[in-house]
Each structure stands twice: as structure tokens, then as C-alpha cells.
Amino acid sequence: MTYLLPLITSFFLVLLFTPLVKKTALKLNIVDQPGPRKIQKKPIPLLGGLAIFLAFTISILIFWQLGYIQDSKISTFHIIAILISGFILMFGGFLDDFKGLKPIQQIIWPVIAIIIIITAGIKIKFITNPFGGVIEFSATLGTIMAFFWLLGMVYTTKLLDGLDGLVSGITTIGAVIIFMVSLYWDIPSSGTSFLALILAGSCLGFLIFNWHPAKIFLGEGGSVFCGFMLGVLAIISGSKIATALLIMGIPILDVIWVILSRIWQGRSPISGDNKHLHFRLLDIGLNHRQAVLFLYLVTTAFGATSLFLHSKGKVLALMSLAIFMILLVSTLLIVYKLKNKNEA
């Protein structure tokens, strides 16, 4: 019951806030219009991430005051930094959804949020050595690594947000896995555990509205907040970077693959297209829900290995993940070409 309370609280709070946020988005005409690279056939309200953030924030404040969250690893300063950073991401996301910011303007808000986090002392201090012991980092190197780690996670979920329910569902899965991993190393009822469950409950509740056909989208703020929080949880849960990489491995490799292919073709790495893995799954004939469920399954399968593997095993699992990604993309390309050839 101790663990269920934060999950249930954030879940029901997001059920309360999402219709209100949807109504506000429609009133302000903050909607995502159909287009050549869009899946939906009608305008869908944005700002859904605001409902997640509100449920997340209120749940944290409730359980923080009840003494559930604060422990030796998570200080008051950390909690305040997480909430302020989340607000910064929501504000930047609102501006982008409302006015449509340029890429150089979009990146300002995640950078500010990350600087706040690392200023609060949330940085990568060490990683587990696969061959035994730990590899410790200096304060400067740990700060730099945390900056690029969080920025990478932010843009992974931002670029992943192409199908209904994809980011909110994968964030739920990731948060639950991080919660379960934290049970193996942390103190009972740790702050990390509660933060992970609050994030999971918030995203799970939102998924009810975001499942295909979506009634509301995450918007810019929501898509970057999900990756940001998974990245923060990976750090404060004892530098479980390998665990987060296993959870987000397919989306991360997909982003790297697409960016490299754009550069190879002489295009801007931040230009838009339909070459992401989730779009390729649609191209070969999977419907919207099947493509999302397939990516849920892969995320759960690789993420769950972190519950049973030690550091050396996780390295092998990451190598297997990379091979799986190469084989998957190659297979999808072959099937797509054969499908087009037969239709021609």
C-alpha cells in the first residue's frame, strides 16, 4: 500500500487535469493540425504534458510533506530543482505549441532545465565497472556527462513522439522498471522509488487520453519532460545509465540512425521526415496500435533484463540490443521494398 499510494494519487490527478488542459488548449486554439508528416486526420489539442506535470508536481508535494520522498540521496534542493526544471520545460513547450519556435529557440529551455538540475548537484558521479568495482568521475567530468546525457534523453523522447501513446507508454514502462531496479540497491521506501512511481502513474493516467485515436497530444513540453525525468531518475537511482539505455535503447539507436542517414544524404540532422522506426513499422503494414504495442514489447523485454543482469551482463545486453536494431531496420527496409515492388 505504501508503494501504491503515490502511483494511484498521480494516476487520478492526471485524470482530473487532462480534460481541463484539453479544454484550455482548444479555447486557445493550441492544436496540432493534420499535414503530410502527421498521422491524425483532424486537429488534436496539444499541451497534454501540462496535465502530467501538474499531477507529477502535486503528487510530489503531497508525499514530500508526508516524508515519503526525502532521504539521504534526494535532498530538498534536488526536489525543488526537479520541479523548477519541469516548469521551465512546460513554459518552453507552451511557447512552442502556441507560436512554433525555431529549433535553436526550442533547445534553450531544455538547456536551462538541465543547468538547474546539475547546479543542484544531480550529476553522474560514477558508473559500475563491468569488470568489477566502479569508475568514478571528477565533478567537472560528471557534470559534463550529466548535461549531454539529459540533453540526449530529452531529444530522444521528443523525436520519438510520432505515434499516439508511444512516449507516454514507454515512459510508464521505463519508470516502473527504474522503480523495480531501485528495490534491489536502495533503502526500503526510498525517494527514488516514489519519484519513479509518481512519474509512472502520471503517464499511465494520461495514456488513457493519448491512446490511439488520441484525444490530446503531449505537445513539446510533455515530450521533452518525459525524457528529462527518465534521465534524472537514471542518475539519482545510483547512476543506472545502462538500465536507462536498455529501456530507451531502441529509440536512442533510431534517433542516431536517422540523424546519420540525414547527414549522409546532405540534409540537416534536425530536418523532419518519416524515416523513424515507428513510421517504418506503419510502412510495412502494421496499424497504429500494433506498431506502438510492438515498441512497448521491445522496450519491456530489453528493460526487464536489467532486473536480472549485473554490469557485465548489461553490457552484453546493450550489444545485443544494437545488433537487434540493425537487423530490425534492415528487415523493415527489405520488407518495405518488396511490398512496394509487389504493389507496383
Image (cartoon, rainbow, N blue to C red):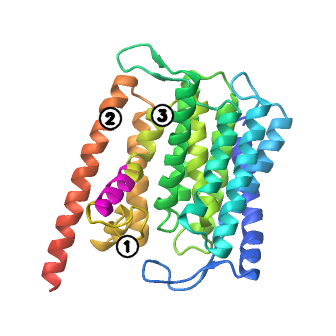
Say whether residue 159 is left or right of residue 236: left
Q: Secondary structure at mark 1?
A: loop
Answer whether residue 124 is visible to the viewer in this image.
no
Q: Position of residue 185 (x, y in %)?
A: 56, 22
Q: Which mark is residue 287?
A: 1
Q: Residue at x 48, y 83 (%)?
A: 35
Few, some or many residues within 10 Å of mark 2 (<14, 14–19, 20+): some
Answer whether residue 111 is visible to the viewer in this image.
yes
Compared to 299, does 208 lie above or below?
below
Q: Pointer 2: what residue?
A: 317
Residue type, label 1: Asn
On the rendered image, what quadrant is the C terminus found in? bottom left
Q: Which mark is residue 241?
A: 3
Name the quadrant containing residue 307.
top left
Q: Position of residue 187 (x, y in %)?
A: 65, 21
Compared to 297, does 43 lie above or below?
below
Residue type, label 3: Ile
The residues colored magenta run 253-263
Does the magenta-highlighted stretch encompass residue 309? no
Name the quadrant containing residue 3.
top right
Q: Position of residue 28 (x, y in %)?
A: 75, 80
